[in-house]
Amino acid sequence: MIENDIKECVKALRKGNLILYPTDTVWGIGCDAQNEQAVKKIYAVKKRNEQKSMIILLPDEKAITHFTDDASPTVFDFIKGVHKPVTVVYPKAKNLAKNIINADGSIAIRIVKKGFAKELLKKFGKPIVSTSANLSGYPAPGNFNDIDMAIKKAVDYIVEFSREDERIAAPSTVVKLDGTGKIIILRP
C-alpha cells in the first residue's frame, strides 16, 4: 500500500496537483513547493491569506542550502536536543515558488527524519509544501478522521496509508534565528 501511495503522490505532485498525506507531524495538504500554481491552489483550498507563508519539507539537512542562503549550524545543534519535529524559519529563501516565500524573504523548513513523508520526499526529489489539513483559522486535525470533508474533496489524491491511525498528532515546534544567532521559539 505504501509503495502505491508514494507512486500516486509523486504522479500528482509532478502534475501540479494537491495531495492529502500523513507528514511527520499532522496530516497535511501538500504540493510541489516550486510550482506557483500548485501553491496557489493550497491557499484557495484552505481559504488562507496568501501573505501567510507555509512550511516546506526536505529529506535531509544538505538540501537546506538549495533553498536558503543562511543555514546556520546553531540550529542543527538545537534540533539535536529536541525530541519532536522542529520547523526552522530561515531568512533569504531561494529556488521556491514566489508565493510560498514570506513577505520578509524567509521560509519555514522542516527536515523529515522518518515515515511516509520521508519516503515521499526521497522519491519526489523536490521540496514539498506541508500545511495542516484544515481550513484557515481552525485547529490542525489530530488524525485523518478530524479532517474536514471540504479539504478531502478539494485535493487530487488522498493517501491510504495511516488513515486508520487514531493517535492524536501534534504540530512541530517552530523556531527562528534572530540577527545575533540566538534561537527564538515561535511555537513550542
Image (spheres, rainbow, N blue to C red):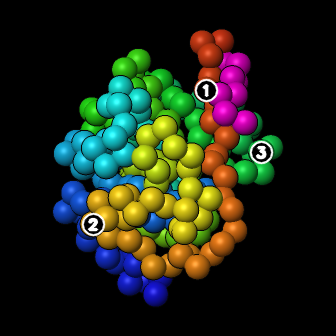
Q: Amino acid at mark 3?
A: Val
For mark 2, what is the residue? 156
Left or right: residue 163 compared with residue 157: right
On-image quarter of the C terminus? top right
Residue 57 vs 15, above or below: the answer is above
Picture quadrant where residue 44 is located: top left
Magenta segment, prevailing SS (helix, strand or loop)? strand
Q: Amino acid at mark 1?
A: Lys
Residue 129 vs 73, above or below: the answer is below
For mark 3, what is the residue? 82
Residue 61 marker: none
Residue in the picture at 27% in, 66% down: 156
Q: In the image shown, does 40 or 74 lie closer to the viewer?
A: 40
Left or right: residue 98 compared with residue 135: left
Dot 2: few (<14), some (14–19), or many (≥20) neighbours within 10 Å? some
* Lower position in the chain sequence, tag 1 or tag 2: 2
Which residue is at the far bottom?
A: 1
For mark 1, what is the residue? 176
- Secondary structure of the residue carrying tag 1 is strand
Range of magenta residues: 181-188
The image shows residue 55 at horizontal and vertical percentages of: 47, 42
Dot 3: few (<14), some (14–19), or many (≥20) neighbours within 10 Å? few
The image shows residue 154 at horizontal and vertical percentages of: 29, 60
Q: CA distance from mark 1 to mark 2?
A: 33 Å
Residue in the picture at 40% in, 63% down: 149
Magenta stretch holds residue 183: yes
